[in-house]
Image (cartoon, grey):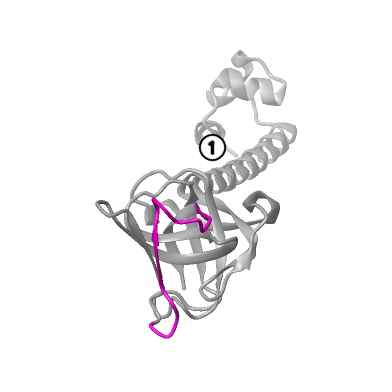
């Protein structure tokens, strides 16, 4: 190894003369003398800088991997999966969504969402009433909310049954249509002013994964 090689290695490592000296237990002046060819590069210095190069390479690789993981976390939402199905048929009895979180996560790119959502959850579809829009065992990702937020696909607790249905509201008559896409299944219309049937919106579906 020449003095110039020694200097190039230091520069590739991105270290100052003082920093390299600290790593090799040498003073800055000793590093300067080595780089100028005034001090011979002993086998000890050669071995130490070789080890140092490997160390920095490994640290760089770890840092790159960490950045990749962080980048993935930045670009993806981790969405809790629920251990219950939202029926596209007759419905399932509901206790409370928080009771069904499994600890498993569905990773979904943020590019799928137009706005920044809150309180995302993922639930599996069961039944055929929403075919062809949704198939059995499809996953839907919904933003947890108890408010009607315009016509669309919702997770709702209708008469104590958890369902996934299309909702359409007539703002004048206050008639809410609960729609099954598959015409072989029943749809409902309820008068929000007079209905005694319990209807609780659990969330609005933002994405489906068929």
> Residue placed at 53% from the left, 55% from the top?
198
In the drawing, does residue 173 fall left or right of residue 92? left
In the drawing, does residue 76 fall left or right of residue 181? right
In the drawing, does residue 172 fall left or right of residue 103? left
Where, by quadrant of the figure, is residue 133 drawn?
Answer: bottom left
Magenta stretch bounds: 183-201
> Residue placed at 55% from the left, 34% from the top?
13
In the rendered view of the protein, which quadrant contains the N terminus?
A: top right
Q: Position of residue 159 (x, y in %)?
A: 56, 62
> Residue placed at 63% from the left, 53% from the top?
97
Inspect the magenta stretch and tell me whether residue 194 lies in it. Answer: yes
Main SS, magenta residues: loop
On the image, numbered disc 1 is attached to which residue?
Answer: 5
In the drawing, does residue 22 fall left or right of residue 63? right
Q: Nearer the viewer, residue 175 or 118?
A: 175
For mark 1, does the 10 Å Cα neighbourhood hold few (<14), some (14 to 19), or many (20 or more) residues?
few
Can the viewer see residue 126 in this picture?
yes
């Amino acid at each position: 190894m020449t003095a110039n090689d020694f200097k190039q290695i230091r520069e590739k490592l991105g270290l100052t003369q003082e920093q390299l000296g600290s790593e090799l237990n040498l003073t800055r002046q000793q590093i300067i003398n080595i780089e100028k060819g005034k001090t011979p590069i002993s086998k000890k210095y050669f071995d130490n800088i070789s080890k140092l190069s490997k160390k920095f390479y490994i640290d760089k690789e770890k840092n790159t991997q960490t950045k990749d993981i962080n980048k993935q976390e930045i670009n993806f939402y981790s969405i809790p999966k629920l251990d219950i199905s939202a029926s596209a048929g007759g419905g399932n009895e509901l206790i409370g969504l928080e009771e069904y979180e499994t600890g498993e996560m569905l990773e979904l790119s943020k590019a799928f969402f137009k706005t920044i959502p809150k309180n995302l959850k993922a639930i599996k579809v069961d039944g055929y009433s929403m075919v062809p829009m949704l198939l059995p065992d499809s996953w839907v990702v919904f933003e947890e909310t108890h408010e009607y937020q315009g016509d669309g696909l919702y997770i709702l607790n209708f008469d104590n049954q958890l369902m996934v249905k299309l909702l359409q509201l007539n703002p004048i008559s206050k008639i809410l249509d609960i729609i099954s896409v598959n015409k072989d299944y029943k749809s409902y219309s309820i008068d929000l002013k007079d209905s005694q049937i319990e209807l609780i919106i659990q969330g609005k579906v933002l994405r489906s994964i068929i």
